[in-house]
Image (cartoon, rainbow, N blue to C red):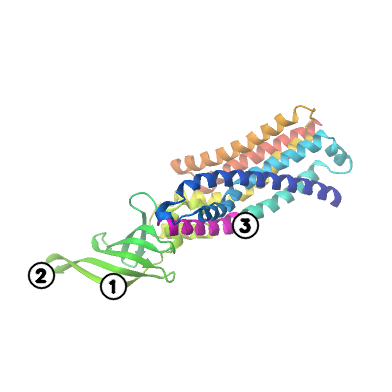
Amino acid sequence: MKTLRRLIYGEVLIAVAFVTVAFLALFFFFDFVDELQNVGKNGGIYQVSHAFTYVLLLVPSHMYELLPISVLIGTIFVMARLAQSSEFTILRTSGLGPTLALRNLMGLGLAFVLLTFAVGDYLSPFCDRYAQLLKSRYLGQITVGQTGAWLRERQEDRSFAVNVTTLTPEGNPKGIRIFEFNKAGQWVSLTKAQVGLIANEEAWDLKEVERNQLAQVNGQSTLARKYIDSERWATGITSEMISVALLKPERMGTLDLFQYIRHLSENGQTTQRFEIEFWKKVFYPLSCLVMVVLALPFAYLHFRSGNIASHVFGGVLAGISFFLLNNVFSYVGNINSWSPWFAAAAPGMLYSLASLAAFGWLVLRQ
């Protein structure tokens, strides 16, 4: 049985690696061609080497997105080829029953799950963050829209609305406005700062500060304004939280996204969208298991010489439809306020049941 497992695992790993490298090369080429339009900008500082490095740092993100579909294509190809050459029939007569075949492929799928999780939760966020900081260093700050990022925070009997226009190449907030409100929700002060240095997770060191504060003098409300070189503001808002508001939440690690959701919840902000993204991050690596289950029925089909390509193409379309449905469920779940874990897990459960049903029907038929 070890020999049979070694044969199947070796074939699948080679096929998946080939498909993954082919896809990554294609995406790298398209990204590099698209990035060439920025070469020479900002006074010629941004050069071809910077564009090449930036595109290279995007490879882990593409790998994370492509791994499940690569697993599907590679596994379908191997299963269909083994069935066409009657090798899988020989393996079945050698003791590879349906349950054992499913268990072996699930073991291989679990390895792909761990690989996908490692790439998506550790390698991809690190490379994405470094790529954005690298690009901003030569092309300008990281920003979004016209108003930047908005965050809220509560501190004892005070609440704050924080607006950050951009992130500097070092990852520090720039163009800061801090609106302070009392317990009754009345505006108390506005603090503006050119830049904030996030020295730790408990405070920002604000530079070039302008503070406008409402004060009561003889029963009259007056606005007091003062300018100071620096001021420390106690806050739990981290650069990762600002990055989420400025960039895409799916580019964060699972733990960072969970901490951001907890911060939003503690400050009375809606978390539906980010909770769905969190559960998608949890369930997305498990889609590799769905892909290998979806590919296994192809080993039990009888192929003629000319119809293997059509079956493989049909399997690939089924895999693509899974990812489309996964995105659709996210948007529909967000609009209809579905349970976040259900919106993220439903496509995988549906396709797993369909794959197991097809597998069982083929086994019983034969």
Type of amino acid under label 3: Ala
Inter-mark Cα distance, 1 to 2: 30 Å
In percent of width and height, residue 313 lies at: 67, 32
The residue mark sitting in front, 3 or 2, is 3
- Where does label 3 land, which residue? 118
Mark 2 Cα shell of 10 Å, populated few (<14), some (14-19), many (≥20):
few
Type of amino acid under label 1: Asp
Type of amino acid under label 2: Asn
Which sits earlier in the primary sequence, circle 1 or circle 2?
2
The residue mark sitting in front, 1 or 2, is 1
In percent of width and height, residue 216 lies at: 15, 68
Which sits earlier in the primary sequence, circle 3 or circle 1?
3
User: Residue 106: in sight, yes or no?
Assistant: yes
| Residue at the (83%, 39%) spot, across then down | 88
- Where does label 2 land, which residue? 218
Which sits earlier in the primary sequence, circle 3 or circle 2?
3
| The C terminus: image quadrant | top right
Q: Which residues are magenta?
A: 118-140
* Magenta segment includes 124: yes
